[in-house]
Amino acid sequence: MKTEQGVTLVEVLAAAALLSIILLLASSVYLFGQKQVTTQTTEIQNQENVSLALDIITKEIRKASTVSVTNNILTINNTDVYQLVNNTINKNNQPLITNIQQFNIQMTNKQITITIEGLSANNAPHTTLSTTIFIRN
């Protein structure tokens, strides 16, 4: 009786096919994970931009002695002007916060309502924050 050691061509091809399927699945999971990380990082940055813009402007309004709103342009103490220009909130014509889609300000009597919406990337949901400030003086 002859005992042959080794593997046949069919066994090698079957092992190679199984290995390639496993590698294809693993790389697919890795690429999907990388895409998710990128999307979530962009979404978090947009949320931080909107939140930071709202925090800065709210603090400035609360410290102000005079506040006026005309055509979505906020003027504080007759010196600081906030407005949206090319997806950037500018303060005195200097960039303050980028990647902003909408910057809406409404003032009625002693009440200011600010709504800020960030730009969305790759079909991510829009980040929108709003606040209402009551002027005391």
Image (spheres, rainbow, N blue to C red):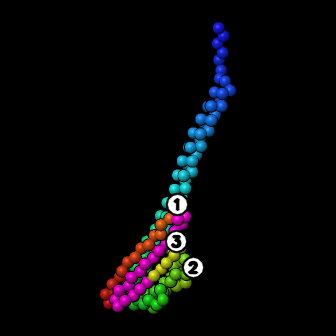
Pointer 2 or 1: first along the chain = 1
The residue located at (31%, 87%) in the rendering is 136
Q: Amino acid at mark 1?
A: Thr
Q: Amino acid at mark 3?
A: Leu
Inspect this view and state whether residue 21 appears. Answer: yes
Would you name the residue on which mark 3 appears? 119
The Cα–Cα distance between marks 1 and 3, rounded to whole angstroms, is 13 Å
Would you name the residue on which mark 1 appears? 39
User: Measured from the top left, where is residue 85 in percent x and y?
Assistant: 55, 81
Give the extent of the magenta segment. Answer: 105-123
Q: Is residue 64 left or right of residue 88?
A: left
Instruction: Assign a secondary structure to mark 1.
Output: helix
Check residue 100 in the rendering and tell me which mark sits there, or answer none.
none
The Cα–Cα distance between marks 2 and 1, rounded to whole angstroms, is 23 Å
- Quadrant of the rendering where the N terminus is positioned: top right
Label 1 environment density (alpha carbons within 10 Å; few <14, some 14–19, many ≥20): some
